[in-house]
Image (spheres, grey):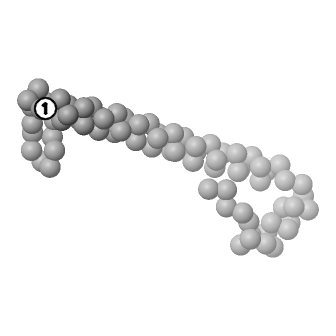
């Protein structure tokens, strides 16, 4: 069974073309979910490495960063 537009359907009653379309949609959904997880993971890692980078800037760069805070390049 699968749900489409709030209605349940029996996939065994689909035509061959319908079965292929359903399989392709399932693969697309799995890929989308994996990409969302990877994006979240990358966002967490980016924040982590930005903090490490900020802590390791030379002292003169830290002072300049405070003055030019609005011009800091967003790495996202």
Residue 64 on image: x %, y %: 85, 68
Residue drawn at the location 34% of the way across and 33% of the way down: 27
Q: Which residue is farthest top?
A: 12
Element under disc 1: loop
Specify whether 10 is left or right of 62: left
Residue drawn at the location 20% of the way across and 34% of the way down: 17
Q: Is residue 75 above or below residue 70?
A: above
Residue 3 on image: x %, y %: 15, 40
Within 10 Å of disc 1 (Cα), the crowding (few <14, some 14-19, many 20+) is: few
In the rendered image, which residue does mark 1 sit on?
15
- The quadrant of the rendering that contains the N terminus is top left
Q: In this view, does 74 lie above or below 24?
A: below
Q: Which of 71 and 52 is in front in this view?
A: 71
- The quadrant of the rendering that contains the C terminus is bottom right
Residue 72 appears in the rendering: yes
Q: Which of 12 and 64 is in front in this view?
A: 12
């Amino acid at each position: 069974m699968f749900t489409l537009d709030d209605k349940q359907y029996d996939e065994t009653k689909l035509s061959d073309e319908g079965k292929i379309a359903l399989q392709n949609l399932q693969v697309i959904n799995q890929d989308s979910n994996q990409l969302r997880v990877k994006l979240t993971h990358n966002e967490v890692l980016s924040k982590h490495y930005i903090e490490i980078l900020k802590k390791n800037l030379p002292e003169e760069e830290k002072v300049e960063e405070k003055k030019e805070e609005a011009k800091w390049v967003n790495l996202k």
